[in-house]
Amino acid sequence: MKPGRLPRIETLFSDDDFVAVSKPAGFSTVSERWDKDKKCLIDLLWDEWKKKDPDAPKPHVVHRLDKETTGVILFARNGQAQSSLRKQFMDRTTSKVYLALVEGFPEPAEAELTFHVEENPSRLGSMRIRKQGKECQSSYSLLESYDQHSWVEVRPLTGRTHQVRLTMSQAGSPCSCDPLYGSGKPVLLSDYKRSYSPGRGKQERPLLSRLGLHAFQLTISHPTTGEMMTIESPLPKDLRTSLRQIKRWSKR
C-alpha cells in the first residue's frame, strides 16, 4: 500500500445483523487516545458504508485486534446484535484460531499454557505476567519449523489483551517483529538466502517488518438465527510472501 493511500476493506460476511471483515495491518480497531487524528478500522468501514448509504449508522464494536494484527474481525450493525456477539466473547463460547510466524522453535512443540496477566504500569500499552492478574489460557501447536522461525497455530481460550503474543513469548518463541514481547527484529531474506545482496548502495527491504500474527478463523453463533458460523480470513500478501521465501531458502 502506497503511503497516504487507505486500503479497501475486504468483507468476509455481511447481513442485516453484522459484518465480518479482514483487518489490514497498521490500523487500530478504534481510535487510540494518543493518536486520535489517525484513521482507525471502524472509520474506514463506516466510510465505505456511507458511500452506498450516506445515512448509514456507525458500526458497533464487538471485539478488537491489535494494530499490527491482521485477520477476521466483527462489527455489529445494531445494538441487539452487538450485545449478543459481545456476550459470546465474554462467555467464551466463541472459537478463535490464530496463525503466527514466531522466532525460534517453541518448546514443547505443542502445549496448553495458563498464566495470569495485568496491565504494565511502567510500559504504556503492554501487559505483564502477574500472579494477581487475570487468567490467560491458550493452546498452541507447531505447524512447520524453518532455520530461524516457526509457523504455529494458537487457540486462545480466554480473551486477554495481547494474549497470543504473551503465550508465544512464554513458550520461548515470541511472534516475529514483536517490539513488546520479542526482539522486534524484521524478517530478512538475507537471514535465509546467504548469497543475497540488495545491490550496490541499496539497503535490504525486510520480508516482514510488522507483527507476524493473523486472526485466521472465528466461530460464532449467529446473533439472530443461532446458527453456528465459521469465518476465515486468507493470509495477507506480506505473510504469504514471507512464508514462501522462508520455505524456499530454509535448510531445516
Image (cartoon, helix red, strand yellow):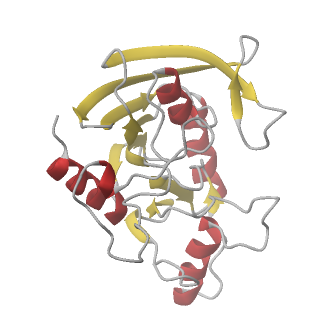
Instruction: Estimate the x, y position of residue 226 in percent, counting from the top left.
Output: 41, 42
What residue is drawn where x is 63% and y is 88%?
54
What residue is drawn where x is 55% and y is 46%?
184
Q: Nearer the viewer, residue 82 or 236?
A: 236
50 sits to left or right of 121: left
Tell me: residue 229, above or below residue 26. above
108 sits to left or right of 164: left
Q: Nearer the viewer, residue 69 or 97?
A: 69
Instruction: Estimate the x, y position of residue 214 in percent, counting from the top left.
Output: 41, 49
Instruction: Estimate the x, y position of residue 66 in percent, counting from the top left.
Output: 59, 50
What residue is drawn where x is 35% and y is 77%?
200
Residue 99 appears in the rendering:
no
Q: How many marks?
A: 0
Q: Residue furthest front?
A: 200
Instruction: Estimate the x, y position of residue 130 in percent, counting from the top left.
Output: 72, 16
Which quadrant holds residue 10? bottom left
